[in-house]
């Protein structure tokens, strides 16, 4: 079938595809993010230069080497590198995105095969996705919906066939055979099987190949919104919308939404031509898939690997920033951890396969920014190990009796305080502006989650890529998030497991004892370090005593306390998990067809006391920093 733009009627609905998500004032204010980032990084650079110079000055005066202070500085810089790369690599593109909101209209539309991959999820969950996919605003003769079930469920097969007979004659069920000893390559293998099956259906394979996760309910204009971007650009082989969710609990205590990634990172990447396939809701050209040998195997992140390989052979990709699909987040801590560590491992596997997007035949036609993006995200995954190390530096320095911030005179101390205060103020403003697309509270939740999740991610990286099997290393395998049943029902107030069992599973089975040990170590280090510094020189004046406390446990931004509060998150979740209604209560269902869509209120994360409590902490930290800054003018 011809796919020229003049074969179809495409309507330009708005100048920006995210017009409903970004109001004009937000779009204007967001452009201020670039200068704020530059100012913040500039002041942080000055701060680190002063730290280095003053540490060396203090060593010369004291005739000794402050090893712990240097370790603190080095690890801080290592952790800062991926953060700086994330902030800087697309800085010039902020506010420059110009993707319009398009719709293909009429019945003259391309053919599409819609694949729903599943493996062990609840039948009703899969069928809700299938029914919504069949109910989209698209000529029924121009698309097919195929459930590809790797779980080979007899009940799902029977229900699908009955639904096809009663309501949707373009709905099919397929399940591939699996043979012992023969690799089946998880989701990538299932998608490749779907390519073969659709080619064998009447009329052959469609020109376009779309995929939905088992829990992702598409909006009615899903296909009409995505396809025009490929029709207007013959080199565009894939369009992908954001993954949004309708069952995120109040306050999102585990930071399960992807709002920061899909509303901040992905639009920026799209501006630079680095839109990734994020696993669900995407549409691809079948010809493009065939040009790279179909979906690649050998990575748990087959979605990102596929789009990266498409970029590597010269195709373009697009991120359409519209709310076109809604799914479910894992309803337990254990399944959330398995999902996120799988993503981390998959990211590294993909980068190893693509040689970190720096060289090789698979990336030979990538642009500079496409290579840089692949490299930056991999480095960020690998440096979770350094992030965990940085969490230990402050308490280690304190318990060893070292000095976090050496200085040789009060003038140096005053300048360190003042430069840090400027950095803190700029960073707070930068947070407000940078988080505008996703929401300020969402951005702060993500920042907190990075710390406590880093422990799990670093362990998964070490066990998968560094350790031999006899030392605890293991090969990562794919497990679909929806197939991981919640053994505690912790979000169901009626069926929730008792507290002792929740704590046992969280602390022992989920290995959160690591967080408890860390918190205990931090508290002991702070108490002992402060006690030793106070009692070591009892003749100190009150001013000297306060300065000693300030330059040890009390140095802003009091990193040890931020780390402690973050690591408390999974324990607090076990003690007081959020209440979530049954999935059916979050949906509006048509009694006749059984088609269900998320209610409008279920699409929005509700804000509760937990979010505000964290904001109180940030405010108190700002007040504390200001007080220290003001007092610096009285240090003589």
Image: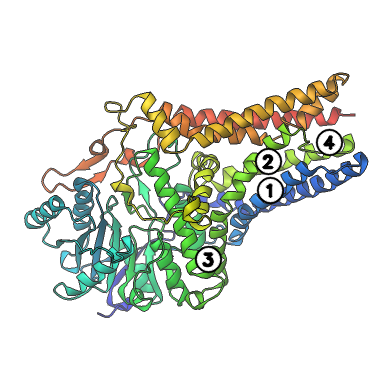
Label 1: state its secondary structure.
helix
Sooner in the amino-acid sequence: mark 2 or mark 3: 3
Q: Which residue does the image show at 76% across and 37% down from the upper left? A: 404
Looking at the rendering, in which quadrant would you find the C terminus? top right
Rounded to the nearest angstrom, the CA distance separating label 2 from label 3 is: 37 Å
Of circles 4 and 2, the one toward us is: 2
Q: Which residue is mark 3?
A: 272
Sooner in the amino-acid sequence: mark 1 or mark 4: 1
**The quarter of the displayed image where residue 12 is located:** bottom left
The answer to whether residue 108 is visible is no
Mark 2 and mark 1 in contact (Cβ < 8 Å)?
A: yes
Q: Of residues 580 and 494, which is closer to you in this image? A: 494
Q: Of residues 341 and 584, which is closer to you in this image? A: 341
Sooner in the amino-acid sequence: mark 4 or mark 2: 2
Q: Residues within 10 Å of mark 4 (few under 14, many from 20)?
A: many
Q: Which residue does the image show at 50% across and 56% down from the upper left? A: 468
Q: Which residue is mark 4?
A: 414
Location of residue 544 with respect to 449 vertically, above or below: above
Mark 2 and mark 4 in contact (Cβ < 8 Å)?
A: no
Rounded to the nearest angstrom, the CA distance separating label 1 from label 2 is: 8 Å
Question: Residue 328 appears at what percent x and percent y?
Answer: 32, 45
Rounded to the nearest angstrom, the CA distance separating label 3 from label 4 is: 42 Å
Question: Residue 623 appears at what percent x and percent y?
Answer: 68, 29
Of circles 1 and 3, the one toward us is: 1
**The quarter of the displayed image where residue 566 is located:** top right
User: Left or right: 519 with respect to 575?
Assistant: right
Q: Which residue is mark 2?
A: 393
Q: Which residue does the image show at 40% across and 43% down from the upper left? A: 336
Rounded to the nearest angstrom, the CA distance separating label 1 from label 4 is: 24 Å
Question: Residue 185 appears at what percent x and percent y?
Answer: 33, 64
**The quarter of the displayed image where residue 562 is located:** top right
């Amino acid at each position: 079938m011809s796919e020229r733009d003049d074969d179809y009627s495409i309507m330009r609905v708005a100048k920006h595809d995210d017009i409903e998500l970004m109001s004009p004032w937000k779009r204007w204010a967001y452009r201020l993010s670039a200068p704020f980032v530059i100012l913040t990084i500039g002041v942080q650079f000055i701060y680190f230069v002063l730290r280095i110079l003053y540490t060396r000055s203090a060593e010369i005066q004291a005739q000794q080497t402050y090893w712990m202070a240097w370790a603190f500085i080095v690890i801080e810089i290592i952790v800062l590198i991926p953060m700086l790369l994330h902030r800087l690599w697309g800085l010039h593109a902020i506010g420059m995105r110009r993707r319009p909101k398009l719709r293909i209209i009429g019945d003259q539309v391309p053919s599409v095969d819609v694949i729903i991959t599943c493996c062990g999820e609840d039948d009703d969950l899969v069928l809700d996705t299938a029914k919504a996919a069949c109910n989209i605003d698209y000529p029924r003769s121009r698309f097919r919906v195929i459930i590809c079930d790797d779980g080979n469920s007899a009940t799902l097969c029977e229900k699908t066939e009955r639904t096809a007979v009663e309501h949707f004659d373009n709905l099919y069920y397929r399940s591939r055979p699996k043979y012992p000893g023969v690799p089946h390559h998880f989701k990538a293998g299932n998608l490749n099987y779907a390519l073969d099956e659709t080619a064998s259906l009447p009329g052959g394979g469609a020109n376009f190949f779309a995929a939905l996760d088992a829990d992702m309910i598409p909006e009615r204009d899903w296909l009409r919104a995505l396809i025009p971007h490929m029709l207007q650009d013959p080199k565009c082989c894939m369009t992908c919308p954001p993954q949004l969710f309708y069952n995120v609990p109040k306050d999102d205590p585990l930071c399960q939404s992807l709002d920061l990634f899909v509303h901040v990172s992905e639009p920026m990447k799209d501006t630079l031509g680095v839109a990734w396939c994020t696993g669900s809701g995407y549409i691809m050209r079948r010809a493009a898939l065939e040009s790279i040998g179909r979906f690649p195997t050998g990575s748990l992140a087959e979605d990102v690997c596929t789009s990266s390989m498409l970029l590597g052979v010269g195709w373009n990709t697009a991120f359409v920033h519209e709310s076109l699909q809604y799914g479910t987040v894992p309803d337990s801590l254990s399944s959330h951890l398995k999902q996120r560590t799988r993503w981390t491992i998959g990211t590294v596997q993909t980068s190893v396969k693509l040689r970190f997007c720096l060289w090789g035949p698979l990336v030979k036609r990538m642009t500079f920014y496409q290579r840089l993006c692949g490299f930056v995200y991999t480095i960020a995954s690998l440096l979770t190990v350094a992030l965990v190390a940085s969490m230990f530096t402050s308490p280690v320095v304190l318990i060893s009796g070292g000095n976090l911030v050496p200085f040789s005179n009060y003038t140096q101390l005053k300048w360190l305080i003042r430069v840090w205060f400027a950095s803190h103020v700029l960073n707070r403003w930068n947070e407000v502006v940078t988080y505008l697309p996703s929401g300020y509270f969402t951005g702060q939740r993500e920042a907190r989650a990075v710390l406590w999740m880093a422990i799990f991610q670093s362990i998964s990286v070490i066990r998968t890529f560094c350790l031999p099997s006899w030392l605890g290393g293991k090969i990562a395998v794919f497990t679909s998030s929806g197939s991981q049943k919640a053994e505690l029902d912790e979000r169901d107030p009626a069926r929730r497991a008792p507290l002792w069992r929740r704590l046992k599973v969280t602390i022992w089975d989920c290995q959160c004892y690591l967080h408890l040990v860390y918190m205990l170590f931090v508290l002991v280090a702070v108490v002992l370090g402060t006690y030793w510094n106070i009692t070591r020189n009892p003749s100190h004046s009150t001013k000297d005593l306060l300065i000693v406390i300030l330059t040890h446990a009390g140095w802003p931004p009091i990193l040890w306390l931020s780390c402690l509060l973050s690591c408390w998150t999974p324990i607090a979740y076990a003690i007081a998990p959020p209440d979530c209604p049954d999935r059916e209560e979050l949906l509006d269902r048509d009694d006749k067809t059984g088609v269900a869509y998320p209610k409008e209120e279920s699409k929005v994360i509700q804000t509760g006391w937990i979010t505000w409590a964290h904001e109180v902490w940030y405010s108190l930290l700002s007040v504390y920093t200001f007080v220290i800054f003001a007092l610096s003018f009285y240090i003589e």
